[in-house]
Image (cartoon, rainbow, N blue to C red):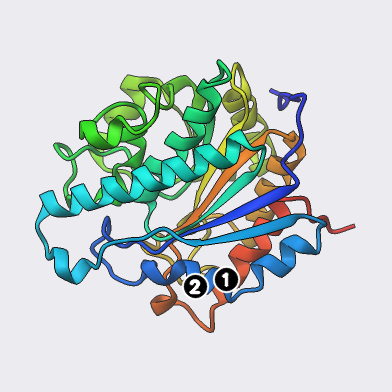
Amino acid sequence: MPPMSLPRETPATVELIGVPIDLGASRRGVDMGPSAMRLSHLVTHLEALGLIVHDTGNVEVPDRARLGTDATALLAAITTVCRDIAQRTADAVRRGVCPLVLGGDHSLAAGSVAGTATALAERGERVGVLWLDAHADLNTPATSLSGNVHGMPVAHLLGLGDPRLAGLASVTPAVRPEQLVYVGLRDLDDAEKVAIRALGIRAFTMRDIDERGLRAVMDDAVAIATAGTGGLHVSCDADWIDPAEAPGVGTPVRGGATVREAHLAMEIIHDTGALLALDLVEINPILDHRNATAELAADLMASAFGRRIL
């Protein structure tokens, strides 16, 4: 299935939004991800492409030490942070600016994607979502084995789970199941497998990539996510790349995409002309080697915004 060509181009202005949050994860360290990305010459890479880059700084995130381990307090804090992110991403998309949200754990996407959905709803359009991740992030508070909210943002975007996080967009659900596509899955809970089938979500696993190749998988994924939508929100967890290449991630799982496959995915996304917003999350400098994962991520963002080999 060939990718759909939309009558738009990726915005020429990028707005960086840092979200130093690790409230949704049990392993600490991803709150330093935005700093690691900024130190990786991300802005220089993007400006070299002729893009205008505005760094808006970081969203305010409560101190985890003060919140303790109380699940109710953590969920309330995450909701507040995600509401702020949603307002910022919605405002950027309204202005024709592409928000690049730097995380932080993946719980932030409940806000970032909701903001894009809100801005598009004001135009009478829906958002298509590409979720590049080793994990489905489709648990709810009732099904999660760990209770970690970074494993729940997709469920909330689909209108499931906690109503506060599920209701951040002006439309409910923020994302329709048929306009969400997973690429790179390889570590799923049983409840997530059941939910993917029940909701009819298209999910391309690493086996699909192994058997068909990244190009064929991405062509199908883009075609699905752009059908009947106003553009793409791409939410990329750095753990979709194999940890041999990207060790500094929140929840590494062996058997992920190669560096070249990851670049090809980003190049294909840029070629659609449909990119409206992008998340890059779950970089953990504590587990990294000389900031190599953040530097790889910066290179991938350059590919997503138009850098070519030749």
Please give the label number shown on residue 303: none
Q: Is residue 234 above or below residue 199?
A: below
Whether residue 103 can be seen here? yes
Seen in the image, is 195 located left or right of residue 69? right
Seen in the image, is 187 located left or right of residue 1? left
Q: CA distance from mark 1 to mark 2?
A: 5 Å
Seen in the image, is 82 located left or right of residue 98? left
Mark 1 near mark 2, Cβ–Cβ under 8 Å? yes
Residue annotated with mark 2: 35
Q: Is residue 99 above or below residue 59?
A: above
- How many numbered callouts? 2
Locate residue 214: give its quadrant.
Answer: top right
Residue annotated with mark 1: 38
Q: Is residue 169 above or below residue 109?
A: above
Whether residue 208 can be seen here? no
Q: Secondary structure at mark 2?
A: helix
Front residue of this view, candidates 148 and 122? 122
Amino acid type assigned to the residue bearing label 1 in the image: Arg
